[in-house]
Amino acid sequence: MRRKLRRKGVRVRRLVRSALSIFLLGMVVMQPSARAAVVDLTTLGSSGSANGAQFYQFDEIPTGTGVIDSFLRIQGFGVQHGYNTDGTVEYDTMSSFTHSIQISDVPTIDIGGTLYREFMLDINQDGQRILSLDELRIALWDTGNLSGYSSIFASPIYDLDAGGDNWIKLDDLLNTGSGHGDMLALIPDSLFTDPSSQYVYLYSKFGVNSAADNGFEEWAYGTQGPLIPEPTTIALLGFGALVLLRRKRR
């Protein structure tokens, strides 16, 4: 009798464990998975979006190193990151060409009835063609000389990684030389609404998905959008670029 009771107890425990395992597995499956969205800007005229912001592959009129109106320059091997400030710079931020900016400094552009603040990115790699922009955060404050990443970006108004590990794929060889813009980042103007915080802090990290090789990356003001084509024009430009490349190869 005791042996039968023991066997029944063992069976009950096994059934309970199996039921618990199935339940936990179901809970894991039911959980929404955060998938990384890759904004691929490695073809001429390409574009994409993430968390309400628009990103465009871009070729600004060449102006030469140090001549574009940059407010943040970052340089390092592998993974490099930093943010703009008039205070003590941190991480891989270079003090030259890095300073505070105000909301009024950043031009606006109307795309399809939505107003955006326009930032320009210029990448300059020494040999590595593909570079990843893995983090982009923008915060507002009432002064421009803060230092301390965690305090400034605890509550950003824009975060590329909100809702998932998103990143942007860039190609340094689409544009030749420094002083060209490589990407336009359009951030919704509706986010820049805090009347008491007029200074804009921009943090960016490069090289997690595709490493940096000691070239410098710099952020500047946008160009008020005269060189951003409509989506249909982008498609035609991309097709035309492919035709030209094929002709050159022949």
Image: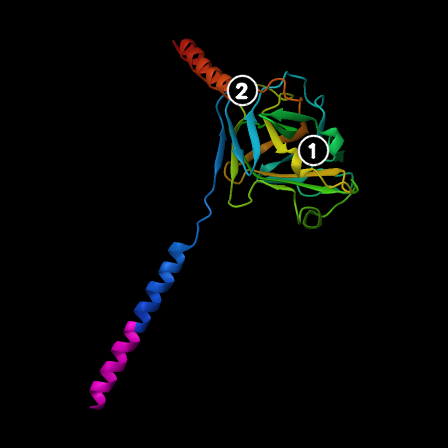
State the separation of the CA atoms marked 2 and 1: 29 Å
In this figure, which colouring scheme has been used for the structure?
rainbow
Element marked by disc 2: loop
Circle 2: residue type: Glu
Please identify the quarter of the rendering in which residue 147 is found. Answer: top right
Residue 99 in view here: no
Q: Which residue is mark 2?
A: 230
Relative height, residue 146 to residue 221 (above, below): below
Report the mark closest to the observer, 2 or 1. Answer: 2
Please check the rendered image and state whether residue 7 is part of the magenta-colored stretch, yes or no: yes
Q: How far across and how far down the image is residue 14, in percent?
A: 28, 73
Q: Residue furthest bottom?
A: 1
Residue at position x 40%, y 59% in the image: 27
Q: How far across and how far down the image is residue 12, in percent?
A: 28, 77
Q: Judge from the rendering whether residue 57 lies leftward or rightward of residue 219; answer left or right.
A: left
Residue stretch in magenta? 1-15
Relative height, residue 20 to residue 214 (above, below): below
Judged by its main secondary structure, the magenta piece is helix
Q: How far across and how far down the image is residue 203, in percent?
A: 65, 40
The N terminus: image quadrant: bottom left
Residue at position x 40%, y 55% in the image: 30
Residue 146 in view here: yes
Q: Which residue is mark 1?
A: 72
Please check the rendered image and state whether residue 106 is part of the magenta-colored stretch, yes or no: no
